[in-house]
Amino acid sequence: PITNFASSEAPALVLVLVETSPAVMLIYRQHLMAARVLLEGLEPKDWVALAEYNQSPRVIQIFTQQKQDVLRGLRGLPFHLGTAELHCFQSMGTVLDWLEPVPGRKSLVVLTTGLDTEQPRRWEALEEKLRASEVVVYPIALGGTLRGFLKAKYPEMEDGTHLSFVQADRDLKEMARLTGGRAYFPKRAQEFSGIYREISSAARLTYNLGFAPASRDGQLHKIDVQVVDAKGRVIAPAENPKRGYQVHARQGYLAPAQ
Protein backbone atom coordinates (compact mmCIF):
# COMPACT_ATOMS: atom_id res chain seq x y z
CA PRO A 1 0.00 0.00 0.00
CA ILE A 2 1.16 3.49 -0.87
CA THR A 3 1.76 5.58 2.26
CA ASN A 4 2.53 8.93 0.67
CA PHE A 5 2.63 10.57 -2.75
CA ALA A 6 3.60 14.20 -3.17
CA SER A 7 5.77 16.51 -5.20
CA SER A 8 9.19 17.16 -3.73
CA GLU A 9 10.13 20.70 -2.86
CA ALA A 10 13.51 20.00 -1.28
CA PRO A 11 16.57 21.67 -2.84
CA ALA A 12 18.18 19.61 -5.59
CA LEU A 13 21.78 18.42 -5.41
CA VAL A 14 23.28 17.97 -8.88
CA LEU A 15 26.77 16.60 -9.49
CA VAL A 16 28.08 17.05 -13.04
CA LEU A 17 30.68 14.40 -13.98
CA VAL A 18 32.62 15.06 -17.20
CA GLU A 19 34.81 12.62 -19.10
CA THR A 20 38.08 14.43 -19.87
CA SER A 21 39.60 12.03 -22.39
CA PRO A 22 41.52 13.19 -25.50
CA ALA A 23 38.49 12.41 -27.67
CA VAL A 24 36.21 14.63 -25.61
CA MET A 25 38.65 17.53 -25.77
CA LEU A 26 37.97 17.79 -29.51
CA ILE A 27 34.22 18.26 -29.00
CA TYR A 28 34.01 19.76 -25.53
CA ARG A 29 32.80 23.18 -26.60
CA GLN A 30 29.63 21.62 -27.96
CA HIS A 31 28.38 20.64 -24.52
CA LEU A 32 30.29 22.74 -22.00
CA MET A 33 29.37 26.05 -23.57
CA ALA A 34 25.70 25.11 -23.29
CA ALA A 35 26.02 23.95 -19.68
CA ARG A 36 24.96 27.37 -18.42
CA VAL A 37 21.42 26.38 -19.45
CA LEU A 38 21.50 23.56 -16.88
CA LEU A 39 22.71 25.91 -14.18
CA GLU A 40 20.28 28.68 -15.09
CA GLY A 41 17.40 26.21 -14.87
CA LEU A 42 18.14 25.42 -11.25
CA GLU A 43 16.81 27.41 -8.33
CA PRO A 44 19.12 29.64 -6.24
CA LYS A 45 18.66 27.23 -3.31
CA ASP A 46 19.81 24.21 -5.37
CA TRP A 47 23.35 22.88 -5.01
CA VAL A 48 25.76 21.92 -7.83
CA ALA A 49 29.14 20.18 -7.81
CA LEU A 50 31.60 19.36 -10.61
CA ALA A 51 33.97 16.43 -11.09
CA GLU A 52 35.98 14.99 -13.98
CA TYR A 53 37.20 11.50 -14.76
CA ASN A 54 39.57 9.67 -17.03
CA GLN A 55 41.23 6.79 -15.21
CA SER A 56 39.74 7.94 -11.90
CA PRO A 57 37.40 10.73 -10.75
CA ARG A 58 38.53 14.02 -9.27
CA VAL A 59 36.46 16.78 -7.66
CA ILE A 60 36.78 20.16 -9.37
CA GLN A 61 34.13 22.05 -7.37
CA ILE A 62 32.45 20.88 -4.17
CA PHE A 63 28.70 21.46 -3.76
CA THR A 64 27.91 25.14 -3.98
CA GLN A 65 24.95 27.39 -4.62
CA GLN A 66 27.20 29.75 -6.55
CA LYS A 67 26.55 28.52 -10.09
CA GLN A 68 29.22 30.82 -11.56
CA ASP A 69 31.88 28.87 -9.66
CA VAL A 70 30.79 25.72 -11.50
CA LEU A 71 30.89 27.50 -14.85
CA ARG A 72 34.45 28.63 -14.17
CA GLY A 73 35.33 25.04 -13.31
CA LEU A 74 33.84 23.80 -16.57
CA ARG A 75 35.85 26.29 -18.60
CA GLY A 76 39.08 25.20 -16.90
CA LEU A 77 38.62 21.43 -17.11
CA PRO A 78 41.98 19.62 -17.49
CA PHE A 79 41.87 17.24 -20.46
CA HIS A 80 44.27 14.31 -20.21
CA LEU A 81 46.17 14.21 -23.48
CA GLY A 82 48.72 11.60 -22.46
CA THR A 83 46.42 8.63 -21.89
CA ALA A 84 43.52 6.93 -23.56
CA GLU A 85 42.59 4.83 -20.53
CA LEU A 86 38.92 5.31 -19.61
CA HIS A 87 37.55 3.81 -16.41
CA CYS A 88 33.95 4.95 -16.71
CA PHE A 89 32.30 2.29 -14.52
CA GLN A 90 34.86 2.43 -11.73
CA SER A 91 34.77 6.23 -11.72
CA MET A 92 30.98 6.32 -11.53
CA GLY A 93 31.04 3.80 -8.69
CA THR A 94 33.44 5.99 -6.76
CA VAL A 95 31.26 9.07 -7.32
CA LEU A 96 28.19 7.16 -6.07
CA ASP A 97 30.17 6.32 -2.93
CA TRP A 98 30.93 10.03 -2.49
CA LEU A 99 27.25 10.90 -2.79
CA GLU A 100 25.90 8.09 -0.59
CA PRO A 101 26.28 9.91 2.78
CA VAL A 102 25.09 13.27 1.39
CA PRO A 103 21.47 13.90 2.42
CA GLY A 104 18.97 15.25 -0.06
CA ARG A 105 17.53 14.69 -3.52
CA LYS A 106 20.59 13.79 -5.60
CA SER A 107 21.12 13.71 -9.37
CA LEU A 108 24.23 12.73 -11.32
CA VAL A 109 24.63 14.26 -14.80
CA VAL A 110 27.32 12.30 -16.69
CA LEU A 111 28.85 13.76 -19.85
CA THR A 112 30.59 10.76 -21.39
CA THR A 113 31.34 8.71 -24.47
CA GLY A 114 30.24 5.71 -22.38
CA LEU A 115 33.41 3.84 -23.39
CA ASP A 116 35.31 1.86 -20.76
CA THR A 117 38.75 0.37 -21.50
CA GLU A 118 39.15 -1.53 -18.24
CA GLN A 119 39.34 -5.32 -18.53
CA PRO A 120 37.58 -7.23 -17.26
CA ARG A 121 34.47 -5.05 -17.43
CA ARG A 122 33.26 -3.79 -14.07
CA TRP A 123 29.68 -3.31 -15.16
CA GLU A 124 28.21 -5.78 -12.65
CA ALA A 125 29.73 -3.93 -9.69
CA LEU A 126 28.39 -0.59 -10.96
CA GLU A 127 24.97 -2.09 -11.68
CA GLU A 128 24.69 -3.28 -8.08
CA LYS A 129 25.53 0.20 -6.79
CA LEU A 130 23.05 1.84 -9.14
CA ARG A 131 20.26 -0.44 -7.94
CA ALA A 132 20.95 0.37 -4.29
CA SER A 133 21.72 4.08 -4.70
CA GLU A 134 19.26 6.94 -4.24
CA VAL A 135 21.01 8.95 -6.97
CA VAL A 136 19.15 9.56 -10.24
CA VAL A 137 21.53 9.30 -13.21
CA TYR A 138 21.23 11.35 -16.41
CA PRO A 139 23.87 10.20 -18.94
CA ILE A 140 24.52 12.45 -21.94
CA ALA A 141 26.37 10.59 -24.71
CA LEU A 142 29.13 12.65 -26.30
CA GLY A 143 30.36 12.37 -29.88
CA GLY A 144 26.98 12.02 -31.58
CA THR A 145 28.27 12.43 -35.13
CA LEU A 146 31.28 10.21 -34.46
CA ARG A 147 29.11 7.49 -32.91
CA GLY A 148 26.90 7.24 -35.98
CA PHE A 149 29.86 7.31 -38.37
CA LEU A 150 31.77 4.53 -36.62
CA LYS A 151 28.72 2.28 -36.26
CA ALA A 152 28.02 2.57 -40.00
CA LYS A 153 31.61 2.58 -41.29
CA TYR A 154 33.18 -0.01 -38.98
CA PRO A 155 30.50 -2.53 -37.96
CA GLU A 156 33.21 -5.03 -37.03
CA MET A 157 34.05 -2.79 -34.07
CA GLU A 158 30.57 -3.41 -32.70
CA ASP A 159 30.90 -7.15 -32.12
CA GLY A 160 31.49 -6.76 -28.39
CA THR A 161 35.18 -7.66 -28.52
CA HIS A 162 36.45 -4.09 -28.89
CA LEU A 163 35.41 -0.70 -27.66
CA SER A 164 31.86 -0.44 -28.88
CA PHE A 165 29.53 2.53 -29.10
CA VAL A 166 26.63 0.10 -29.43
CA GLN A 167 27.54 -1.44 -26.09
CA ALA A 168 28.17 2.00 -24.61
CA ASP A 169 24.69 3.12 -25.67
CA ARG A 170 23.15 0.09 -23.99
CA ASP A 171 25.11 0.77 -20.80
CA LEU A 172 24.09 4.43 -20.67
CA LYS A 173 20.42 3.57 -21.19
CA GLU A 174 20.59 0.98 -18.41
CA MET A 175 22.23 3.45 -16.00
CA ALA A 176 19.28 5.78 -16.50
CA ARG A 177 16.62 3.05 -16.39
CA LEU A 178 17.86 1.55 -13.12
CA THR A 179 17.84 4.90 -11.32
CA GLY A 180 14.74 6.51 -12.80
CA GLY A 181 16.67 8.93 -14.96
CA ARG A 182 16.92 9.33 -18.71
CA ALA A 183 19.75 8.88 -21.21
CA TYR A 184 20.34 11.39 -24.00
CA PHE A 185 22.06 10.87 -27.34
CA PRO A 186 22.41 14.28 -29.01
CA LYS A 187 23.57 14.28 -32.62
CA ARG A 188 24.09 18.02 -32.99
CA ALA A 189 25.54 20.72 -30.75
CA GLN A 190 22.24 22.60 -30.89
CA GLU A 191 20.52 19.82 -28.95
CA PHE A 192 22.50 20.32 -25.75
CA SER A 193 20.59 23.39 -24.56
CA GLY A 194 17.26 21.56 -24.70
CA ILE A 195 18.72 18.54 -22.92
CA TYR A 196 20.19 20.64 -20.11
CA ARG A 197 16.90 22.48 -19.74
CA GLU A 198 15.00 19.20 -19.42
CA ILE A 199 17.43 17.79 -16.85
CA SER A 200 17.33 20.90 -14.67
CA SER A 201 13.54 20.68 -14.64
CA ALA A 202 13.57 16.96 -13.80
CA ALA A 203 16.11 17.47 -11.00
CA ARG A 204 13.91 20.12 -9.38
CA LEU A 205 10.40 18.79 -10.08
CA THR A 206 10.00 15.21 -8.92
CA TYR A 207 7.45 13.13 -7.01
CA ASN A 208 8.09 11.03 -3.94
CA LEU A 209 6.10 7.81 -3.74
CA GLY A 210 6.38 5.95 -0.44
CA PHE A 211 5.42 2.52 0.82
CA ALA A 212 6.28 0.24 3.72
CA PRO A 213 8.66 -2.52 2.54
CA ALA A 214 7.17 -6.00 2.67
CA SER A 215 10.29 -7.38 4.32
CA ARG A 216 13.29 -6.06 6.22
CA ASP A 217 15.95 -8.37 4.89
CA GLY A 218 18.56 -5.85 3.71
CA GLN A 219 18.18 -7.13 0.15
CA LEU A 220 17.45 -5.48 -3.17
CA HIS A 221 13.81 -5.77 -4.30
CA LYS A 222 12.38 -4.96 -7.72
CA ILE A 223 9.58 -2.43 -8.07
CA ASP A 224 7.46 -1.44 -11.06
CA VAL A 225 5.68 1.92 -11.09
CA GLN A 226 2.57 2.04 -13.27
CA VAL A 227 -0.26 4.51 -13.84
CA VAL A 228 -3.83 3.24 -13.56
CA ASP A 229 -7.22 4.76 -14.37
CA ALA A 230 -10.13 5.27 -11.99
CA LYS A 231 -11.05 1.57 -12.30
CA GLY A 232 -7.55 0.38 -11.51
CA ARG A 233 -6.69 -0.60 -15.07
CA VAL A 234 -3.09 -0.06 -16.13
CA ILE A 235 -2.65 2.71 -18.69
CA ALA A 236 0.13 1.86 -21.11
CA PRO A 237 2.75 4.59 -21.50
CA ALA A 238 2.70 6.39 -24.83
CA GLU A 239 5.28 5.47 -27.44
CA ASN A 240 5.46 9.16 -28.29
CA PRO A 241 6.21 11.09 -25.04
CA LYS A 242 4.62 14.23 -26.51
CA ARG A 243 1.25 12.48 -26.75
CA GLY A 244 1.06 10.86 -23.34
CA TYR A 245 2.85 10.13 -20.11
CA GLN A 246 6.19 8.46 -19.46
CA VAL A 247 7.22 7.06 -16.08
CA HIS A 248 10.83 7.47 -14.99
CA ALA A 249 11.20 5.68 -11.65
CA ARG A 250 13.71 3.55 -9.82
CA GLN A 251 13.64 -0.14 -10.75
CA GLY A 252 14.20 -1.36 -7.22
CA TYR A 253 14.96 -0.50 -3.62
CA LEU A 254 17.23 -1.71 -0.85
CA ALA A 255 15.09 -2.94 2.02
CA PRO A 256 16.20 -2.00 5.53
CA ALA A 257 17.81 -4.73 7.59
CA GLN A 258 16.26 -6.00 10.80
Image (tube, rainbow, N blue to C red):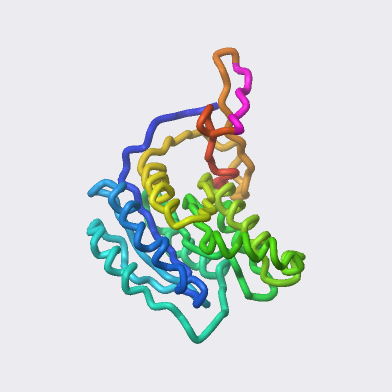
Q: Is residue 20 above or below residue 48?
A: below
Q: Residue furthest bottom?
A: 82
Residue 105 vs residue 165, the one in the foreground:
165
Q: Is residue 7 above or below residue 105?
A: above
Q: Give how far across and how far down residue 221 sits, in percent.
A: 63, 44
Instruction: Report the side of 172 relative to 46 (left or right).
Output: right
Which span of residues is magenta-colored?
Answer: 232-239
Residue 34 vs residue 11, the one in the foreground:
34
Asked whether 75 falls inside the magenta stretch, the response is no
Q: Splitting the image into 4 quarters, where does residue 52 fall?
A: bottom left
Q: Give how far across and how far down residue 209 sits, in percent.
A: 47, 34
Q: Give how far across and how far down residue 187 sits, in percent.
A: 52, 55
Give the residue displayed 41% in from the left and 38% down from the top.
206
Instruction: Report the side of 64 relative to 88 (left or right).
Output: left
Give the residue displayed 58% in from the left and 47% down from the top.
177
Q: Give how far across and how far down residue 95 sits, in percent.
A: 46, 65
Q: Is residue 214 above or below residue 94?
A: above
Q: Of helix, strand and loop, which mostly describes the magenta segment?
A: loop
Instruction: Report the side of 140 relative to 127 (left or right).
Output: left
